[in-house]
Image: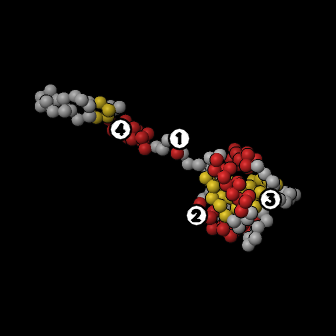
Amino acid sequence: MLVGAGEYHEESGRPARPRWAGGTPALLSSLVKIMQPPASMASKPKVLLVEDNADVRRLYAIGLNQRGYEVKLASNGAEAVDRVASERPDYILLDWLMPLMDGREVLERLRPDNIDIIVISGQPAPQEMPERVRSWLTKPLTVDELVSEMTRARVS
C-alpha cells in the first residue's frame, strides 16, 4: 500500500515522498502482482492438430479454439515434425493415415518429450498401442470427445 501521498514535511512544507508500506519487500511483492497477466490472459493449452483432410482439420480447429485451446495446424506428417520443434505443443492430435509421412513415421522422428500424443484415425486401434501414444480415438469424433480425451490424458 502506498503511504505518504498528500502529506507534507513539517519543516519544509514540501510534499512528502510517498513510500510503500512495509518497505522494499512489500514493493516487490506489489510489483509482481501488478505484472502478472490476468487469469483471462493465462496461457492456453497448445494443440498441434495433424490431419490431412482440410474440412476435418478446420472443424476441429474451430471447435478447439472455442473451447480455449491454442491450435496449430499441420496437413501431413512432415509438417508435423517441423512444427513440433518450433511450437512446443502440449498435445498432438495425430491422424494415422496421411500422405508423405504417416503417423508411425512421425512418432519415429519425434524426440521423446513431455507431449501427450493422441491418435485420431478412421482405423480401429491396434492390439498393441504404439509407443508414446497416450490413446487412440476412432473417427468420426466430436470436438467434445477430443477435449475429454485431452483432459483425461493430462490428469493421468
Instruction: Mark 1: give few (<14), some (14-19) or many (20+) Cα within 10 Å.
Output: few
Gap in angstroms between the C-alphas marked 3 and 1:
35 Å
> What residue is rendered at 61% in x and 53% in y?
70
Furthest residue to the right?
127
Where is residue 142? Give x, y as percent: 76, 49
Give the mark, 3 or 2, whose residue is nearer the N terminus. 2
Gap in angstroms between the C-alphas marked 1 and 2:
25 Å
Gap in angstroms between the C-alphas marked 1 and 4:
22 Å
Q: What element carries label 1?
A: helix
Amino acid type, label 4: Leu
Instruction: Mark 4: give few (<14), some (14-19) or many (20+) Cα within 10 Å.
Output: some
Gap in angstroms between the C-alphas marked 4 and 3:
54 Å
> What residue is rendered at 15% in x and 33% in y?
14
Instruction: Mark 3: give few (<14), some (14-19) or many (20+) Cα within 10 Å.
Output: many
Q: Is mark 3 on a helix, strand or loop?
A: strand
Where is residue 36? Give x, y as percent: 46, 43
Question: Which picture quadrant has residue 10?
Answer: top left
Q: Do the residues labelled 3 and 2 touch (CB within 8 Å)?
A: no
Give the mark, 4 or 3, whose residue is nearer the N terminus. 4
Query: Is 100 placed left or right of 28 in the picture?
Result: right
Name the residue tied to disc 4.
27
Name the residue tied to disc 2.
86
Q: Do the residues labelled 1 and 2 touch (CB within 8 Å)?
A: no
Where is residue 54? Give x, y as percent: 71, 62
Instruction: Say the numbered circle drawn on residue 39.
Output: 1
Give the number of the mark in front: 4 or 3. 3
Furthest residue to the top?
10
